[in-house]
Image: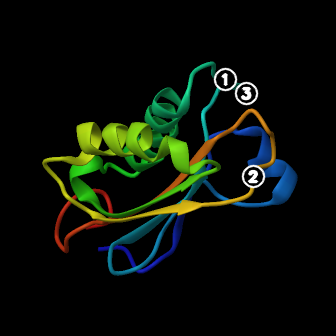
Amino acid sequence: MTSEVRRVTTGAPWEEQFGYSRAVELPGGLVLVAGCTSVVDGQIADGGPYDQAVNSFNVAFGALEKLGLGAEHVVRTRMYITHARDVEEVGRAHKELFDAVRPAASMIIVSGFVDPRLVVEVEVEAYRPAGTGEGA
């Protein structure tokens, strides 16, 4: 296990502009992934709440992959949505991606995001067990 904090950037437009890392791995194996939205190649991807949730989680998975981790390492998710009507669609996406993993999860209704076309943002926390992977 590493004794240093590791940081991952993905080139997303807001990382540099606002000064944050997409993911941070702490000594001890906890990995925190920043809020992820449905931005693909610098553009907001088309689609409704389900599609935005899948795209957002895929952004998070990409950051985890850079640390040698996958969905099976996720221990907590947070889903932020702008409308209560989207609960079922976002929940369906979460179930499809995490049904075998069953992380602790929260879904929170918020007033909006940095771009009004976004209706979903997700955060992920993962854990690298001691003695496994890149941090070992």
Mark 3 touches mark 1? (CB < 8 Å): yes
Asked whether residue 8 is in view, the answer is: no
Quadrant of res 57:
top left
Q: Name the residue: 64% across, 41% down.
A: 119
Q: Give the spatial CA distance, label 1 vs label 2.
A: 22 Å
Q: Amino acid at mark 2?
A: Gly
Above or below, 116 relative to 69: above
x, y percent for residue 3: 41, 80
Secondary element type, mark 3 = loop
Quadrant of res 38:
top right
Mark 3, residue position: 42
x, y percent for residue 133: 24, 57
The label nearer to you, 1 versus 2, is 2
Q: Give the spatial CA distance, label 3 vs label 1.
A: 4 Å
Circle count: 3
Q: Amino acid at mark 3?
A: Gly
Where, quadrant-wise, is the N terminus in this rendering?
bottom left
Mark 2, residue position: 112
Q: Amino acid at mark 1?
A: Asp
- Circle on res. 83: none
x, y percent for residue 39: 65, 32
Mark 1, residue position: 41
The residue furthest right is 17
Q: Counting residues from the N terminus, which is met first, the one under dot 3 or under dot 2?
A: 3
* Mark 3 residue crowding within 10 angstroms, few (<14) / some (14–19) / many (20+): few
x, y percent for residue 21: 65, 58
* Mark 1 residue crowding within 10 angstroms, few (<14) / some (14–19) / many (20+): few
